[in-house]
Image (cartoon, rainbow, N blue to C red):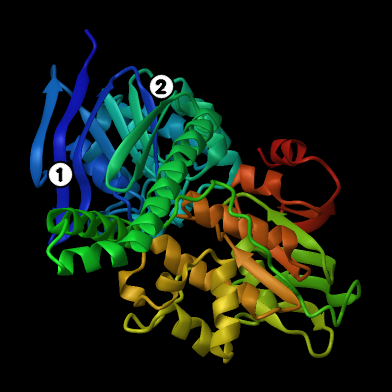
Amino acid sequence: MTKTIALKNITQAFFERVVLDDVSFKCTDQDKICIVGENGTGKSTLLKLIASTAKPTEGNIEKQGHIRCHYIAQEFAATDMDMTIEAYITKYAGPSLFKKVFTNGNTLGFDLEKSKTKECRSLSGGQQKILALSVGLATSPDFLLLDEPENHLDVVSRLELVELLATYRGGVLFVSHDRMIIDAVADKVVEITGKKLYVTEGGYEAYVEHRLSRIASAQREYDKEAKRIRQLSENMTILKQKAFRGKNVAQYHKRLAEMSELKEKHRENDRPEDKKTMITLKNQGSGFHGGKLLCRIKDLHFRYQHAKSDILLGIDLEMRSGSHIVLLGRNGSGKSTFLKCLTGSILPTKGEITWADGIKTAYFDQHAEFKSSHTALEAISDALACPDERARTILGMMKFSSDKMTERIENLSGGERMRIRFGVVFGANPDFIILDEPTNHLDEVTWEILLDACNRSKSMILLVTHDYEFISELTHKTFWLLKKQSITERHKELVELIEELR
């Protein structure tokens, strides 16, 4: 018997902010559905409603049959941090499923059995995610509900997760920004935009085609309305004069109301835009060190105090202006430690890092905060000490409309705030940029903006990401492989390097 969950005329509001407005949706335990949309549109909210961890403001949720759901949030629950791995598995899966959980953990790249006495708070973000996923998969619920399951997983673990989800015997509903995972797992895509749901049969490419068609239709309607506003504006003076003389008064008020309604609609909804965020990033990188050696790393070692062995061992590398380097490695292999050595936040145990004189660097921090009372324009101006005109240019590159530039940051979506952070990094025109997992939590538009910014940039870029599609779309890249405590430059295809990391 097929089990179903049906959302009927659901409205969800948080105080005065409506996230979902009178939406209906049905899923079965045979569906594999990806939920997409810009940050802040209600993707996590929709999952929580289906999981019954949240109740709708209005509407009903009907479940046919005895249904078991297992919900895994974006981040590991703070209330579970003090538990050991063993206790966590006992609580959420039960002693009879230990073997199954351990098998899933090994597949995803973490030996849970060997680490079962460790407290969850001592685990890395990737290890916590593997623990949560391993337990969820082992319990075999009718519906597995996953909020950005790829977060913190390295590129190899993501590929293994795809296999587990694609072959899972049950319904899978997941929020994801990883196109490779969407295409490999989803047979339907649900987009949340404008407080409504739009369902597309098929994977990511089918969704893109459907979305572009819908946007084109909306563009035509918007342009038609704009033409009508112009016509009404041109005729309004004459109608007003006639009404003043007592003629056609009803027609004047009717046309005035129509024009006011259309103008209000246009103020609230910008003109629909194409999926492709065609932006131009000019003068990226100072060019002062063009093609020249920026940094030389010689015999670099690093070992934490009281550790039994080195994390980094005998690394010799060079970085030159204009090159775009992707650093690949499994979770826990030392990528973050290496970046900390480069930025000077920790000192190497042995070896040298030598920079050329006058190097201007920028480090992307996805947790950087801005004053909530400031506007996007003020945030850029303050961070880069630049005039408003320059700040407007940078925000334009980040796809901000004129109105959004002057909106308070506290009213912006998560994706828009992330674009401000990227604006600070690329707008500084640095010689060297470090991007440490910048694709985490990115909505589609911001993902496109970042990719385009990287591909157009003349700055030296060192990128750490586990987003297979992003790496594939990055042009003119060089791979560095971190394995067995050492980093080497490799001239192979991405798929071959991933096999080496397995």
Q: Is residue 252 left or right of residue 84?
A: left
- Left or right, 215 with reference to 342: left
Q: Reply above or below: 428 against 171.
A: below
Residue at the right extreme?
292
Q: Which residue is mark 2?
A: 168
Provide residue 433's location: percent of width, then percent of height.
Answer: 69, 72
The mark total stands at: 2
Res. 321 in view = yes
Q: Are marks 1 and 2 in contact (CB under 8 Å)?
A: no
Q: Judging from the image, what secondary structure is the residue with disc 1 in?
A: strand
Amino acid on which the number 2 mark rests in the picture = Tyr
Distance between mark 1 and mark 2 Cα atoms: 31 Å
Locate residue 128 relative to residue 263 in the image: left or right: right
Quadrant housing the N terminus:
top left
Q: Give the residue at x 66% y 70%.
A: 434
- Dividing the picture into quadrants, the one containing residue 367 is bottom left
Q: Going from the N terminus, do you reach mark 1 or mark 2 first?
A: 1
Q: Which mark is residue 246?
A: none
Name the amino acid type tagged 1: Thr
In percent of the image, x 73 and y 36: which residue is there?
Answer: 495
Image quarter where the C terminus lies is: top right
Of the pair 254 and 491, the residue shown nearer to us:
254
Up the image or down, 18 lies above or below 314; here it is: above
Give the farthest residue toward the top.
1
Q: Nearer the viewer, residue 61 or 264?
A: 264
The residue that mark 1 highlights is 11
Which residue is nearer to you in this view: 314 or 198? Answer: 198
Residue at x 44% of width, y 23% of height = 187
Would you identify the image quadrant in which residue 51 lies? top left
Rendered residue at 14%/24% (across/down): 63
